[in-house]
Image (tube, rainbow, N blue to C red):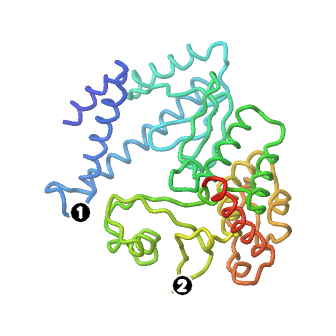
Amino acid sequence: MLAKFKQERRYRALGDEPMSQALKVMMNSIYGLFGSDGIFEFQDYRVAELVTAFARIKLIEMKELANQQFGMNITYGDTDSIFVSKINEEHRHELVDSFTATCRQNLGVEVDHQNTFVRSILVSKKHYIGIQTDGKVVIKGMEGKKRDRPSYFNQVFSQLIEDYRNNEPDLSLNILKAFKQLEAAEVDPSLLAYSVVLNKDPDEYRAYTPQHKIGTSMNEEAGSLIKYYKTGQEEDGYRGYSTNYQDLNVDVYKEELWRIVKEILTLQGYDIKLEEQIFGGEVEDDIVYDTSLKLTQRQQTQRRRSQPNAQQNESLAKYLLSIQILNYVRS
């Protein structure tokens, strides 16, 4: 059956990507069945282990072939793909075609050329951004693109990527502007709401999740879209959420937004001074950099959240005023 599915993936060559992806999902699900418990009569972990072992072996062989025979530099690879650099642009097509043909002939592996990036940012496993030769942007796995994040976060992230695509000389300008707008309550509070669709009834979620807390308080059912704000308050040892924008905690939103953009900025050479600008010198002593200059997570935010914060209260007051004015203009 797997061999039949593999043969049917010719749909990709025919330009029918949806059918090709459907067959890929079916092949992957068969692997999952062998590695699962209690849902498949012929379940056997050894089969699943052989599949992953075979994939690792072939990936290593592809890496060696690309590096040793074709002089390519392996930049990154995971699961079933490799990213290579140091390819002569003038002969790129011929070299890639030759590599894929050699993989098919020598390794018995069908390899497709997916993308060519003129510039890219590899953040972590399955998290990357690439600018194609035609200027289009490919974004994989990045937090800033997720639909459950506040719309404002998505906008700030998109602007950062647009600045990177346009090769702007200073990526920090619009980032600093975004944080200042957040602090000054110049952002429509509706753009700061988190949203999530309930995949099941609220009482089926764990008690500390927003799906349970907000969904239960609003008497929602599976399939409903709920929106909420992060309060920064702890309730029974867990994070607090509210449907009222007046309960949002500006400090929490600043930290969440920084978490989305910091890796890109750090990898592009922006150091801790930028964070000090954003957080007004309130950066904790335990923020450190590893050898790749990636910033670790902020470790002691709870202390600052629990303390009275005049600036936060002032910012919240501005939010209250701004929404009143906004409602007035809309009426």
Whichever of callouts 2 and 1 sits on the residue coming sooner in the sequence is: 1
Residue 247 horizontal side relative to residue 50, left or right: right
Tell me the residue that label 1 is attached to: 37
Instruction: Please rate how many residues cluster around mark 1, counting C-alpha atoms within 10 Å: few if below 14, some from 14 to 19, many from 20.
Output: few
Residue 19, horizontal then vertical, whole percent: 30, 30
Outermost residue toward the bottom in this view: 236
Quadrant for the C terminus in the image:
bottom right
**Residue nearest the observer in this picture, 206 or 285:** 206
How many discs mark residues in the rendered view?
Answer: 2
Q: Which is closer to the viewer, label 2 or label 1?
A: 2
Q: Give how far apart the Cα atoms at labels 2 and 1 are.
A: 34 Å
Residue 99, horizontal then vertical, whole percent: 51, 22
Any mark on residue 237, and which?
A: 2
The residue at the point 82 percent across, 55 percent down is 271
For mark 1, give the secondary structure.
Answer: loop
**Residue nearest the observer in this picture, 287 or 18:** 18
Quadrant for the N terminus in the image:
top left
Q: What residue type is labelled 1?
A: Asp
The residue at the point 82 percent across, 46 percent down is 173
